[in-house]
Image (cartoon, helix red, strand yellow):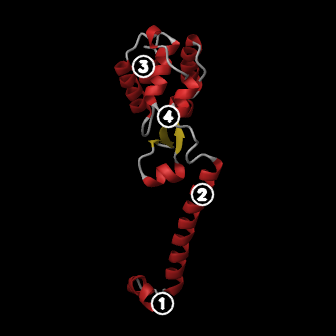
Amino acid sequence: MNKIITVPEGLIRSMGVKNPRPYVYGAYALAAGILIFIVVRAIKRNREGKWNSGLTQERLTEELGKLNTNGAALTKGEAITIAQNLLNAMDRFGTDEQAILDNLSRCKTASDLNLIIQSFGIKPKSSTGLADTWVERNVEGVMKNLNGWLRDELSGADLMAVKKIYDNLGVAL
């Protein structure tokens, strides 16, 4: 046991502390507590269905049904570009509300909007945007589609403007 605490103990002794063991044991206890918190939270989120909500790309396609792209004004390529623009507008700190409204305003029919929602797909969302680290994906992140991202990122007048676009097209937000 002495070998484990030798390095931290020596470091603390060099700072002038005569009995460093309580500090070393306290640091180990704190690190263990943080690790236990992260593991318990990940397990709890998984049980609550927040880790992976079961909202898969296949289920999203089933919910939206077969798209009638005959009435769509957008091509699949345009829908993918708009979906990427929407993700870029909502990713990381800050949200570009105007970019969201501009891109959603390009939808002329419900088929257009559903095509964009399907192109956006299901993405892990953390408090700062797209969850790209292990901790963000497994502890903090929640799988959401475009509608979930919009509800998380927008509020007030901006959310009402997006809701109006959705309502005009007959699609639920």
Badge nearest the viewer, 3 or 4 = 4
| 2 or 4: tag closer to the N-terminus | 2
Question: Which residue occupies the foreground of this view, 20 or 69?
Answer: 69
> In the image, residue 118 lies at what x, y percent?
47, 26
Q: Which mark is residue 103?
A: 3
Spatial CA distance of label 2 from label 1 is 31 Å
Disc number lying in front (2 or 3):
2
Q: What amino acid type should be assigned to the residue bearing mark 3?
A: Asn
Q: Rounded to the nearest whole Å, what is the CA distance between mark 4 and mark 1?
A: 51 Å
Q: Which mark is residue 1?
A: 1
Q: Is residue 100 visible?
A: yes
> Residue 57, labelled with which disc?
4
Q: Secondary structure at mark 4?
A: helix
Q: Alpha-carbon distance for marks 2 and 3?
A: 37 Å
**Tag shown at residue 43:** 2
Q: Position of residue 6 (x, y in %)?
A: 41, 87
Q: Quadrant of residue 74?
A: top left
Residue at the (46%, 21%) spot, across then down: 115
Q: Position of residue 99 (x, y in %)?
A: 41, 23
Give the mark toward the camera: 2 or 1.
2
Residue drawn at x 51%, y 33% is 58
Mark 3 neighbour class, 10 Å CA radius: few under 14, some 14 to 19, many 20 or more: some
Q: Amino acid at mark 4?
A: Gln
Sequence order check, earlier mark of 2 and 3: 2
Circle nearer the viewer, 4 or 1: 4
Q: As shown in the figure, which amino acid type bears the numbered disc 1?
A: Met
N-terminal of the pair, mark 2 or mark 1, is: 1
